[in-house]
Image: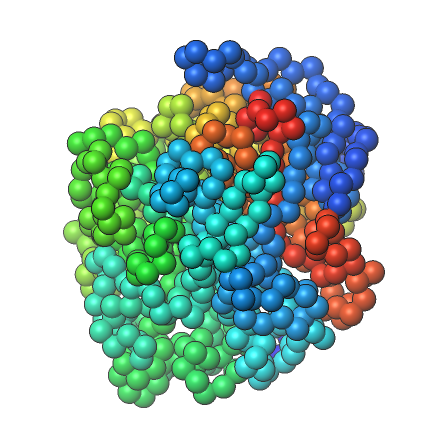
Amino acid sequence: MTQTIDFNDENSNTSANPSFDSVLQARLSRRGLLRGSVGSVGTTLLGGLAVSACGGGDSVAAIVPKDPVAPVETLLSFAAVAKTMADTVTVPAGYTASVLYALGDPLTAATPAYKNDGTDTDFENRAGDHHDGMEWFGLGADGKPSTSAIASGLLAMNHEATTDEKLSSFFLHANGGVSTLPRPAAEVDKEVAIHGISVVEVKNTSGKWATVPGSAFNFRLTALSTNVQINGPARGNALMVTKYSTDGSKARGTLNNCGTGKTPWGTFLTGEENWAGYFTRSAIDDTTRGDKSVASLKRYGRNAAAASRHGWESAGADDKYARWNISQGPGAATDDYRNELNTFGYIVELDAYDKTKTARKRTALGRFAHESAAFGKPVAGQPLAVYMGDDSRGEYIYKFVSAKAWTAADANPVDRITTGDTYLDSGKLYAAKFNSDGKGDWVELSISNPLIAAYAGYKFADQADVLVNARLAADAVGATKMDRPEWCSTNVANGEIYFTLTNNSNRAINSAVMPPDSANPRVYTDIKNGASAQNGNPNGHILRLKEDAAGSTAITFSWDVYVFGAESSAAPGTVNLSSLTGEQDFSSPDGLVFSPATGIMWIQTDDGAYTDVTNCMMLAALPGTVGDGAKKSLSYTKTDGSALNVDTYVGKAPGADKLKRFLVGAKDCEITGLCETPDGKAMFVNIQHPGEGTKMADILDPGKYTSQWPSSAGYGAGKRPRSATIVITKNDGGRIGS
């Protein structure tokens, strides 16, 4: 059986939810308006990494005080890294990047070193694959949790997926694996185990960072882990009942973990993203079910007879394989896995410091393709707000508001994970509506909302049903379809919330489903390499919003577009609306993190529209505030000759001193995940799936790999590419980005 599926392009929102205005589809040629010049740069290669001696710009950097008594430092003073397609990681002159933790690295002293030839096993005790979002948890000299520790700590990290072609995760298997059904159980066991989360201790000894393989803190939480419980309104609900959990109280593992968050009480949050594609159901399952669950399954991208991503369900009769087939059998829900899909798609909380604590799936925060979870600024006596995005085309932005008001003493609780129970298991979930006047509304997703209670598209039974089927509830209230909302992050300076909208090939000028609107105004065709038209909004943009009232309690907000992704030479009136230059242009923003130490906003890309010019990248930004730009009116002519006008709100164009390229990654990789030590002097960044363009047929010929990164000492040139965490430091010992 052969399949080619991009689960990031899942598109199941066929609702008629609003688009406020329309714009003309601007048909542009990459070799014409979109083609920009590529600067050259001298680069010193260091073991597969690079320190770039880049040409400087004419930036006049912002001056920000480091602290009340220290001398001022200049942020973004580094020379911008040039675009490059080299198979290396490039950082500015004056910085060093080193590989720290790669796929297969041991987590225990007894686990053998990784051979990286497809014969390795025991991935429950090794680093997983596709390193993604991560957070830092400090350890003091006494080995206890510390919010100020800078030389020792834990990295809690997502392992999103694995590089695959057809059905097989071919880099994991000696000869590329079996890409037909049935799949071998031994191969499936490896592939399941590389998903999930790892927690690994890292330590700086005499200026060199390394993992601590024998640390008692190290552990994995995989897609088979039993130490996960269902919390919140859906716990015990009939929708959560499976053969594995006959009372609907627990789930087996976590899957396709992407973005992260860190709670004010010191725990780790991970988002389950493209989990639906791992499951299959029979061709007759719609008929067998004969109930409303079919509408739910289709809304979450699982049609009858839809192929699973890896064919894990075919590996045998054991429950650990059977769970991936969610067809309804003749008996009760306790006899099969018809509801297994309902147990995925949540924000999951765990205590990185204590692997004995049971992880929680927080159903009160809704079920969808979660990316990160960003808290608004905690204020004593006010509820907490958590912001989230649903990463699929045409999906929504959400906010959860806790029922409990924040208590400052909970920043250092006796039991971190049960403190999470008090804030994240009860509250209100909202979906966002973006209005054409630069304002917006948070609409509560509640069974008591008449729009939900009387929704014709799905009959909700109770509040748990609303949360498990949050997408359908957001359809019901008319939330605004967005261009793949990915990571979100809170501006540490002013509390405003930023969302990356990566791209959307389904935006179309005459579309009745996803026409352009004020919050998603650009639609055009980008011709890549003279062919392969990329339609819709191929370069993406970053949205930001400001609550109109006191933080978490607000039900209205103001918004604008911080920056539009574009090539620097693109048409300024329709595409390059932010006037980006060659030292700051980018496409498809994805990861987004504000540094608590410096206030710099780090933007990471996961791009396919600009990769004929440069590998994916990371940029540093000093953003302003909502409303610092102006309304922009775009006027176009539709294909039938009629006029179209759209008003959008665009922030002040970031000058050379406010937005600058800091890093370019290896071939075929995505840059994702970022955290720092509290002093901002060590930064951890993930390089995901280098070499994913390699063909399975070439698995035994390293010369045909599209990437051989990392090739630094200890990893072996010519070996299979590996996702990995790098650590970046400044050679003069200063803070990253200064």
Apparent side of residue 343 relative to residue 672 in the rendered image (left or right) = left
Instruction: Check the image and report above or below for 289 versus 627.
Output: below
Apparent side of residue 452 relative to residue 138 in the rendered image (left or right) = left
**Residue 39 in which image quadrant:** top right
Apparent side of residue 544 relative to residue 93 in the rendered image (left or right) = left
Residue 362, given in percent of the width and then of the height, sits at 29, 55
**Residue 498 in which image quadrant:** top left
Q: Residue at x 28, y 79 (%)?
A: 333
**Nearest the camera: 157 or 155?**
155
Residue 199, given in percent of the width and then of the height, sits at 45, 54
Residue 539 in view of the camera:
no
**Nearest the camera: 641 or 655?**
655
**Nearest the camera: 201 or 225?**
201
Residue 537, given in percent of the width and then of the height, sits at 58, 42
Q: Residue at x 34, y 54 (%)?
A: 354
Q: Residue at x 26, y 39 (%)?
A: 412
